[in-house]
Image (tube, grey):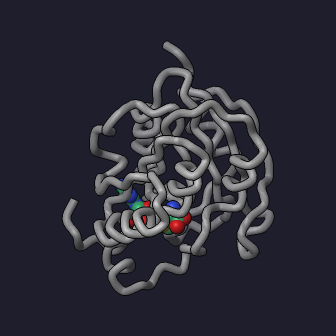
Amino acid sequence: MNGVTPWQEKYLANDTPWDKGEASPGLVDFLNSRPLAPGSVCVPGCGLGHDARAWAARGFQAVGVDFAPAAVEAAASRALAERNAARFSCADFLRDTPSMEFDWVFEHTCFCAIQPEQRADYVRAVDRSLKPGGRYLAVNYLIPDVQGPPFGTSREELLERFSGTFKLREEWMPRSYSNRTYLELMMLWEKRRA
Ligand SMILES: C[S@@+](CC[C@H](N)C(=O)[O-])C[C@H]1O[C@@H](n2cnc3c(N)ncnc32)[C@H](O)[C@@H]1O
């Protein structure tokens, strides 16, 4: 992936209104409230890396993936400055072979950032990034927008797209950034074993 995507340009221009300077509140609450076995996690479309750092701070081997080199460089610098063990990789999550099979994939504002016609590719990418029995934890953005990014989705679409490959374990409305309150739905899926 070259360095001239619209996303890369946004990061270079410091025009990143989606970035709230902190991890998703729903993820923070999840990590603080659950007894979780140590493991590995992939964070696709990780941006500046707040979510990946939150997983790493909780003891996970966290790898943030983004195809915008400026985001990956900034995320790696922040992790270094905070002595946080999260690692970052510049790759196309939809096309590139994952570096390993992970225990977890964590979604937050990547699914709504890609073109809707790429969503089947996204589901396949989550599938190949996970071990059998691995968990897909998603903060979904339930907005109606068809002009994006962000592109909206619905609970119905998510059930239809993910139910074939994954089994839904839990869903709940999380605590959110103030401008996304009541617009997010968290879902915890388990990859079906062959
Ligand atoms: C809306 S931003 C969200 C960033 C981060 N998750 C956050 O919440 O701050 C979407 C991110 O997805 C990245 N992205 C979009 N398509 C991607 C792809 N195919 N592979 C890897 N990263 C991608 C963009 O570069 C951008 O950093």
Q: Nearer the viewer, residue 97 or 164?
A: 97
Q: Is residue 101 visible?
A: yes
Tell me: residue 15, above or below residue 93: below
Q: Position of residue 97 (x, y in %)?
A: 28, 38
Splitting the image into 4 quarters, where does residue 35 fall? top right
Residue located at (65% from left, 38% from top): 159
Q: Is residue 117 visible?
A: no
Among all residues in the image, which is located at the extreme top? 194
- Name the image quarter holding the N terminus: bottom left
Tell me: residue 58, above or below residue 166: below
Q: Position of residue 177 (x, y in %)?
A: 71, 70
The number of numbered discs placed on residues in the rendered structure image is 0
Residue located at (44% from left, 42% from top): 120
Q: Nearer the viewer, residue 104 or 125?
A: 104
Q: Position of residue 110 (x, y in %)?
A: 49, 57
Residue located at (42% from left, 48% from top): 63
Among all residues in the image, which is located at the extreme left? 2
Among all residues in the image, which is located at the extreme front? 83
Q: Left or right? Give the position of 42 relative to 174.
A: left
Q: Left or right? Give the position of 92 relative to 63.
A: left
Residue located at (53% from left, 37% from top): 104
Q: Position of residue 134 (x, y in %)?
A: 54, 28
Q: Nearer the viewer, residue 189 or 114?
A: 189
User: Quarter for ligand 1?
Assistant: bottom left
